[in-house]
Amino acid sequence: MSSRKPIPEPGERKLPRRPASELAEKWTRIDGVDVFYRESPNPTKDERVMAHVHGFGLSGRYLLPTAERLADEFHTYVPDLPGFGRSGKRRDMLDIPDLARAAVDFFDDRGVEKATLVGNSMGCPVIIEFAHRYPERIDRAVLVSPAGGLFNQPLRRAIKQLSQDAPREPVKMARVAVPDYVRFGVPSTMKMFRSLTQYPSLQRLLEMRIPTLVVLGQRDPLLPHAHRVDEIASQTDSHVLVVMLEGAAHAINFSHPGQLAHVIRHFMDDLPIENDPAWPGHVRLYEVHRGKHHPPAQPRG
């Protein structure tokens, strides 16, 4: 383990060093790879641990708006998984099971026994695989705009969906995403896309037995319609709470951090999913599905 900042390889494009977050920026070294991550600056021992897992080709930077809003209530981590963002690359290309293993290695390195995982897009299959392989290490799962599977195949369809999503996201999102995509590169994109779309997300999701929150954007072109989501979620009677956010597209963690942090807090405390009257009229949350054995929502005292 090391706190030093790695020296870039010759010819490697230097990324901005200006802190992009209120969270502390740190480095460690795991299995010979330098891993960059952000952490709550002053965590306490009794805080629940929450880690945020980024999407396809991206770093954890776009997750910060939501993570920062929860950092005072949870011991928060936002890592760049190996091969992504500012973290080093591995010689062998990571797939979904590899990334789940990288996540548990990160927790081992940080001395974290158990955590709630919050993922966006590709981060959701990583969390699902994490829960499948290491169920004793995960407390709850929050799956925001889960990606992958048949609905995003073939690649040309996924590219079309992404092109439809881009104008629905805040302009500032491009300033974060484009440098990450360029750094990730075309060869990595092809390999990672193949792994993502072949991963059995639905089967694994239905096997999960931990409290799970799924948050969907009503304007997200990468996901099926809400009625199809409800149909799928109804195949399990154990654990899934599905919430739709009107006015949101795919990158909810970046575009609607206040609303997402709000619903995560309520989910973590088993409170009813309620809208804040201060929100704009075009933004509201509503339940699509609640599993029969999901922890019952407790009314506010």
Image (tube, rainbow, N blue to C red):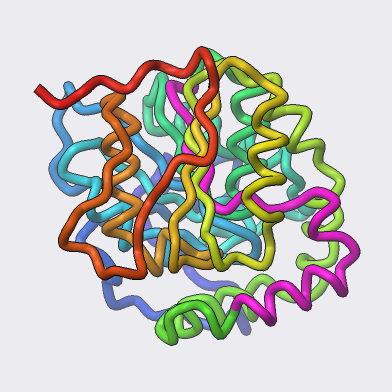
- Coordinates of residue 270 in the picture (x, y in percent): 30, 24
Asked if residue 167 is among those painted magenta in the image, a careful observer would answer no
Q: Is residue 74 visible?
A: yes
Q: Residue furthest right?
A: 154
User: The C terminus appears in which quarter of the rendering?
Assistant: top left
- Snapshot quadrant of residue 153: bottom right
**Region in magenta:** 138-165
Nearer to me, 107 or 268: 268
Name the residue located 59 percent from the left edge and 61 percent from the top edge: 84
- Snapshot quadrant of residue 102: top right
- Coordinates of residue 60 in the picture (x, y in percent): 46, 59
Nearer to me, 196 or 21: 196
- Coordinates of residue 29 in the picture (x, y in percent): 49, 45
When the figure is inspected, residue 89 is found, relative to residue 95, above or below; the finding is below
Nearer to me, 28 or 172: 172
- Coordinates of residue 142 in the picture (x, y in percent): 47, 38
Name the residue located 28 percent from the left edge and 77 percent from the top edge: 18
Classify residue 291 as left or right of residue 184.
left
Q: Is residue 106 visible?
A: no
When the figure is inspected, residue 267 is found, relative to residue 77, above or below; the finding is above
Name the residue located 30 percent from the left edge and 49 percent from the top edge: 261
Asked if residue 159 is among those painted magenta in the image, a careful observer would answer yes
- Snapshot quadrant of residue 9: bottom right
Label count reads: 0
Name the residue located 67 percent from the left edge and 79 percent from the top edge: 164
